Amino acid sequence: MAKRIDVSGLSAYYGAHKAIDDISMTVEPRSVTAFIGPSGCGKSTFLRTLNRMHEVTPGGRVEGKVMLDDENLYGTNVDPVAVRRTVGMVFQRPNPFPTMSIFDNVAAGLRLNGKYKKSQLNEIVEKSLKGANLWNEVKDRLNKPGSGLSGGQQQRLCIARAIAVEPDVLLMDEPCSALDPISTLAIEDLIGELKERFTIVIVTHNMQQAARVSDRTAFFNLAAVGQPGKLIELDDTERIFSNPSVQATEDYISGRFG
Amino acid sequence: MSHAIQDRPVATVKRTGSLSSARLPRWSPIAIAAGSIAAGIGIGVAAGWHSKIQWGMIAALLFVLTTYALTTKVEGSRQAKDNVATSLVWVCFVLAVVPLVSLAWVTISKGMEVLDVYFLTHSMNGVLDAEAGGGVYHALLGTIEQVAIATVIAAPIGLLTAVYLVEYGGGKLAQAVTFFVDVMTGIPSIVAGLFILATWNLMLGFGPSGFAGAMALAILMMPVVVRSTEEMLKLVPNELREASLALGIPKWRTILKVVLPTAIGGITTGVMLAVARITGETAPVLLLVFGTKLINPNPFEGAQSSLPLYVYEQYAVGTDAAVSRAWAAALVLIAFVMILNLVARGIARWKAPKTGR
Amino acid sequence: MATTTPDIQRSRRAKSASRPGDRVFSGLSRGSGITLLVIMAAIAGFLTYRAALAISKDSTNFFTTFEWNPAGNPPVFGIAVLAFGTVVSSIIAMAIAVPVAIGIALFISHYAPRKLAKPLAYVVDLLAAVPSIIYGLWGAIFLVPYLDGLNKWLNEYFGWTYIFDKANDGPARNLFTVGILLAIMILPIITNVTREVFLQAPKMHEEAALALGATRWEVIRMSVLPFGRSGIISASMLGLGRALGETMAVAVVLSPSFLISGHLLDPGGGTFAQNIAAKFNEANEFGRDALIASGLVLFAITLLVNGAARWIIGRRKEYSGAAA
């Protein structure tokens, strides 16, 4: 049940500091949208406003609207817990729960949201691990702690955990930056498969990665250090990397700065 | 998916339809708390309970139960659990604050009744139990002497032990020392007192004295000094040591001139906190120093007094005048300990950047 | 390599031997460490020796006798009442203090507004330094009268539970009050240690739970509490050690007797440390040895508690070692 995200006039703050300024964009369902830009341009902050994780940071505050199909994530009476249940997230560093087994890690989100029979749980966990291309590697040690896996496997375990609850959207915050090239390739392949079912937004520092995995790319920039980050342009990935319409984008992509 | 699986009902993920849900208004916890307190007082008065503790407990119980009932009804069971956890945490906070505030308030208000310059500068010489007057001078003097002697014994041993563990350690001996420092931290103060009693007094035949008490206090102080100094030395970056050694400076001079000065702020704090801790110890002093009404400036001979012991003795006498004196002495003691603590923490904050944290 | 290594070692040794300063300083610091070990050995040794002197002349079983009369002829003394009182009051203290301390620690680390959390942590730090005799004074003069009413109420409505049945109508100078006072005393130390551990819980696991749609309580249950478990245990053991050995507060509050009673609200009973403080002044040399014997038991119990804590923490580390 992939959904469309429609952002309008969104600004985010850390205390008095404005981190991103007046961003509007549309993220298409069943596609991969990549956010690129120099460090500190607010792309990760913006990503975290899409599932209301930004307000968890002390002093974090958001203005503007984020529509998920026809519901405003920041509307009154909207429960942030329900938002995060619907918009899943994968983090920069793999973070499986250290005290839980592989099985329990995948089932963690399900157990929060309702009661399941053991057989149902088994089925969903298997389906999710298969969806994350991890099943064959771990099917014999589902009861071992998830922290015993390699970095790339742990990250796929986190993806399995996120997709187990069948979110509408999957946010990925530099999911490969802590991984080796082979694990990175595995995750990139996986992203290509997952976009059949989910709306995917990925923040990346690696422009080749953005070019490889995404359908559309958004370029963020900031005027100077300490200034809020802004969305410069959002277009089909091919256009952004071949013929961007803004000079700053071209400068960044050709490596002239950042 | 194979056909065999498709025949069975496929497990589906459960989810709620909408993102928004009914919430209790923001002010509801305050309203529930106010209502619960009112009800608690009401029930308490109606039932004629004298103890305010019961009123408070009823209020706390009502607060948690009402929160649970209301959120279950309005927001659902998951939110209810969350809210109950929040309200329980708040109840714990209040539960802890009430006795501790009461302790501070009672000590200060009761202590101020008698405390004045006369009280600080006179002993109990010739003062009858039921009589007002007298003071803590002899006890204050005793405490300062005993704590000073204990520090002189314990601080160097503790410091050098920590240096040994951090700079020279690694062998079996260091492991044993680490283990027994941990064990020593857990020794009840009365056991330390009994040890000195068994050796110094019963075996060697010495009478009670400030020095005997100081030795027991030193035993209690040593492990604390070792632990805190060890922590501080570990914070000194290795690059500093290597830089100094690379200049051809011998290890002992490196430790004395580079490592210890870098950590000196933290070490001072640790020692002062340890001093504050032993200042309040009563049990070993009771066994070894014995207590007296007179000023005895010589810690090596004859009974002395000390502040905590004075508090205990005056309380045990039980007359109004004596209990007032106990409160005043308690206030002096608490002020003494708190000033040590505040100064120690001040030093820690002031010196903190230099330790490279 | 095999032939050169000894040479290098020899030259290094030769160098350090040539510097008397190094030898003296390392000798001094090693000597201090050894001094500490000697003190510990001496404590165990001398206490055991004096205790043996006393117990060998005890005319009854030291562990099961309900009486303390070492001056009698023949001397009769046993620690059964003291062991009971010490254990019961410590259990009450732990049952109250541990959950409340976890609550306060969570309050400071995860619930309180930041402006309140910092000063609060500071105040709790300071409270851990309040001398026990002051808790005792406050307990005897203030807490006891307040608890009188609670005692009557518990007796009236929960008397059927046996433990709250109050047969003796004296003031609340009983093991129940002692337990509550001990709980208040060990609260700051347990809170401090658990708070430190909770604050160290990795943010990334909390975020993982949040991103799955967990409520604040679920986040704490999934990521903070499992991480903090060994910290909670060691903090509790630290508190238990304090409660077991606390002398003055108990001596001031309890009205002791040499009887074991399951009625916690009845005045009476005693603890090891309290008994030593109370009986010390009237005891002759043999009586003091008898008290030393009881102190030795207390010492052994605290050692066991500390050892158990260390063992639990060690095992936990092994279990979650891969996690760190």
Image: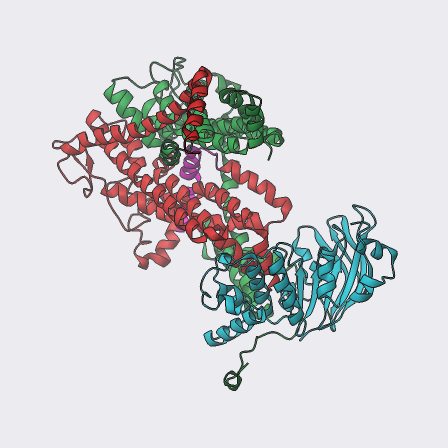
In the foreground, C324 or C188: C324
Q: In this rendering, is residue A57 above or below B335?
A: below
Q: Is residue C173 visible?
A: no
Left/right placement of residue A167 relative to residue A68 reads left
Which residue is drawn at the image coordinates 34% and 29% (left, top)? C37
Q: Which chain is green?
A: B
Span of residues in magenta = C128-150
Q: Position of residue B58 (x, y in %)?
A: 48, 56
Residue A171 lies within the magenta run:
no
The relative height of residue C29 versus residue C77 in the rendered view (above or below) is above
- Whole-percent x, y for residue B67 in the image: 55, 62
Q: Nearer the viewer, residue C138 or C212?
A: C212
Query: On the rendered structure, is C19 left or right of A10?
Result: left
Residue C199 lies left or right of residue B208; in this view the side is: right
Residue occupying image coordinates x 46% and y 44%:
C190
Display colour scheme: by chain
Residue at the location (54% across, 29% down)?
A: B266
Give yes or no for residue C133 being in the magenta stretch.
yes
Which residue is at a point 21% across and 36% down the rendered structure image? Answer: C68
